Amino acid sequence: MFAGILVLTAFALVLDTVVGMIEKRLMKWQPKSGETERL
């Protein structure tokens, strides 16, 4: 049970890092007006 929680936590951290990198990459070429469409 505890190992499963650790795996889920690690997966969430990795996913958050990947999403953050993708967002930064998109913000480089995306116009400022695109920010209002973010959820």
Image: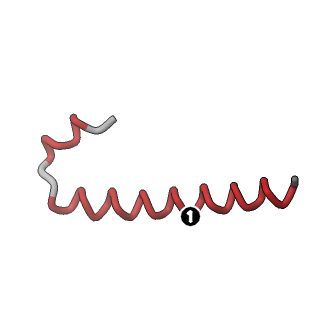
Q: Residue at x 73, y 61 (%)?
A: 7
Q: Position of residue 28 (x, y in %)?
A: 20, 62
Q: Is residue 6 left or right of residue 39?
A: right
Q: Nearer the viewer, residue 31 or 15?
A: 15
Residue 3: image quadrant is: bottom right
Q: Nearer the viewer, residue 39 or 28?
A: 39
Dot 1: element:
helix
Q: Residue at x 45, y 64 (%)?
A: 18
| Number of callouts | 1
Q: Is residue 12 left or right of residue 3?
A: left
Q: Is residue 5 left or right of residue 20?
A: right
Q: Is residue 39 above or below residue 22?
A: above
Q: Residue at x 62, y 60 (%)?
A: 11
Q: Position of residue 4 (x, y in %)?
A: 79, 57
Mark 1 — residue? Answer: 14
Q: Position of residue 37 (x, y in %)?
A: 22, 36
Q: Residues within 10 Å of mark 1 (few under 14, many from 20)?
A: few
Q: Residue at x 87, y 55 (%)?
A: 2
Q: Quadrant of the C terminus?
A: top left
Residue sticking out furthest to the right: 1
Q: Position of residue 27 (x, y in %)?
A: 23, 56
Q: Amino acid at mark 1?
A: Val
